[in-house]
Image (tube, rainbow, N blue to C red):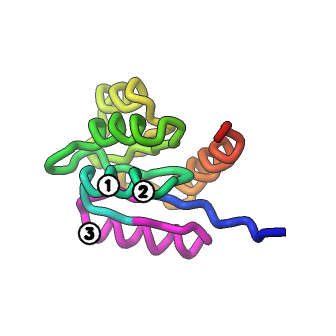
Amino acid sequence: MAEPTAPSILVVDDDKNQRNMLAFALRDKGYVVVAVDSGAQALEHAKIHVFDAAVCDIMMPGINGVDTLKQLKLVQPGLPVIMATAYATNALAAASMQSGAYGYIAKPYELKELFSILERAVIRDSRREP
């Protein structure tokens, strides 16, 4: 019987410190992590790797987070994407959720809060049809 593989998480954040901290914390929790600094890089990876969930910053240069979310959903329709931003507004949260976000979290966030959302997303993701 094959060993179960660890859930694979895509982290998209243009802030190097935030991206590295989150990638480290997720790896420490046992996740496989691909961390990128732009929506364009996220889309490239999503075309060749299947992810169990993604965490995406909203405010990024180039392709912003909401547009990245929309495009990720075209590449991997069932992918649960948690949107994160330091510029939390009701309008951004609504735009994210209307675009198919699984969840929305304001920075700075507690890692345990993000882990809780991610764990629910991965459990939901493991039940979806291939």
Tell me: residue 87, above or below residue 108. Answer: above
Magenta span covers which residues? 11-34
For the residues labelled 1 and 2, say whether their Cβ atoms are less than 8 Å apart.
Answer: yes
- Which of 85/66 is in front? 66
Give the CA separation, mark 1 to mark 3: 19 Å
- Could you tell me how far apart the alpha carbons at marks 3 and 2 are, in whole angstroms? 23 Å
Q: In this view, does 119 lie above or below 75?
A: below
Sequence order check, earlier mark of 3 and 2: 3
User: Pointer 1 and pointer 3: residues touching (CB < 8 Å)?
Assistant: no
**Dot 3 crowding, Cα within 10 Å, few <14, some 14–19, many 20+:** few
Q: How crowded is mark 2: few (under 14 residues within 10 Å), some or many (20 or more)?
A: few
Dot 1 corresponds to which residue?
44
Question: Which three-letter amino acid code belongs to the residue tagged 1?
Answer: Glu
Amino acid at dot 2: Ile
**Residue 54: image location, x then y, percent:** 46, 51
x then y, percent, for residue 103: 49, 39
Residue 2 pos. (x, y %): 78, 69
